[in-house]
Image (spheres, grey):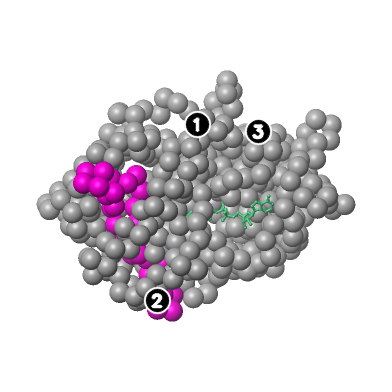
Amino acid sequence: MDRFDVLVVGAGPGGSVAALVLARAGARVALLDKSAFPRDKACGDLVGPRGVQLLTDLGVAIPAGRRVGDMVVVGPTGRRVRLPSAPGTTYPGYGISVTRTVLDAAIRDAALGAGAEARLGRADRPVVRDGRVAGFQTADGRVVLADHVIGADGATSRVATALDLVDRRTALWGFALRSYVTQRVELPTIVFVETGRWRGLPGYGWLFPGPGGRANLGLGTGSLSVRDGTAAVRALPGLVDRLRRDGLLEGPVPEGRRLGGWLKMGAAGTVPARGRVLLVGDAAGLVNPLQGEGISQAMASGAAAAHAVLDTPGSAAQRYAAGLATASFPFLAIAGGMHRSMAGRPAVVAAVGRLATAPVIGQLVAGGWAIFWNDLLDGAPPSADRWVARSAMALGKALLGTRRRIGEEPGAAPPPPAPGGPASLRTAVTRRR
Ligand SMILES: Cc1cc2nc3c(=O)[nH]c(=O)nc-3n(C[C@H](O)[C@H](O)[C@H](O)COP(=O)(O)OP(=O)(O)OC[C@H]3O[C@@H](n4cnc5c(N)ncnc54)[C@H](O)[C@@H]3O)c2cc1C
């Protein structure tokens, strides 16, 4: 039987960053994953600017990462808009493209280098002692005991379901799949897809640059509270045809390298922390419901959970939840509300896609759109683009409100404000040794 200060379940970006911050501070950390590393993961392989900043702050070097800046969006009618990438006061003006095999192994190696101990096994059942979670038992019967458990085990988190932290009726799901193609792609390209005239898909296809002359081709769709990936699977051949027609794709798409995965979005239907258990990343449902980004959020929440455990071990869950409530939930509530209100209305999705990529309008809103949907408003320097993004936030709030508080225990009092203010979750990475 193993005993630790913290058991981190899942060694993706969220879990490994949590383990790294904890281990550097001298905590005894077990980093448990069901897969042997290096391992692949279905992903578009783009780390956004906030994620790049976090990795820099943590001093984690990512080998073979390729810088990506501006992004091209192709509307349903083939019209194109270029979304500019600009630096903010808290993030650089670029993201990186790096395979998950490389990225996840690099962060995990940093955590193990800092003293976290790797364990191979599938977390299965919580171990409960004196009425509180005191660790987890793996599927092959081994027990790992710890004072705190950080659930970083992805969208279908066993930690979250075993502890009844997910409400299936209100969770917000998406599904996406990707393939690799041999093609040099300069700018990340997003394609709004219609399955019939004026029948917009609540999601998008993509062709993203990758290292070594490869590109990442994929498609993701939202399916509200139902976990259903069939729309994405069905739409993929149409996307491939479309990319060919538009002159964006040249070679074949190899079947064998296709991989799919779930996205749990908008922090919807998930209690992020209770007692001595904290959920981070996809386990907490932190994926951006507007564009599917989740790596930066996973790493930021992993760091925040680690700091909450280190700084206030007796009330880490409250501290962590309060940080999320101020830093992440306002955007996620609006983005989730927008996603929800459009997902079942293909004509509305089509109209928005056409309008946003229409001549003049597309050019006018592109800068603000890039800030808003990438959740880069906090830290964006004053400009007309920031004004557009602010207006989008204000409009979203006015139309949808943040009436339904997300991520809280039913009937619970609102959490206390996060020490350090709203930005503390995003910037709370200090190197401790
Ligand atoms: C097709 C696709 C494309 C995407 N593209 C992008 C993109 O381009 N950019 C972006 O930012 N985000 C993207 N996302 C979202 C992104 O992949 C996730 O948000 C991100 O991986 C979340 O990190 P995480 O650490 O929370 O979880 P994960 O990366 O999912 O890691 C979870 C880990 O937990 C382990 N695990 C699971 N269950 C158990 C268990 N019971 N016991 C032990 N270990 C367990 C898994 O093996 C895994 O290593 C995409 C998602 C999909 C599906």
Residue shown at 48%/35% (left/top)? Answer: 225
Q: Residues within 10 Å of mark 2 (few under 14, many from 20)?
A: some
Query: Residue 236 at x, y = what percent?
Result: 37, 57
Which residue is tagged 3?
Answer: 164
What whole-number distance in Å separates the C-alpha atoms at marks 3 and 1? 13 Å
Query: In the image, is 134 to the left or to the right of 422?
Result: right
In the orientation shown, which residue stands out farthest toward the top? 411
Q: Quadrant of residue 351?
A: top left
Residue 37 in magenta?
no
User: Where are the magenta residues, as a range?
Assistant: 188-216
Query: Residue 9 at x, y = what percent?
Result: 68, 51
Give above or below for 285 relative to 294: above
What amino acid does circle 3 point to? Asp
- Of mark 2 and mark 3, the one earlier in the sequence is 3
**Quick one: SS at disc 3?**
loop
In the orientation shown, which residue stands out farthest toward the bottom? 212
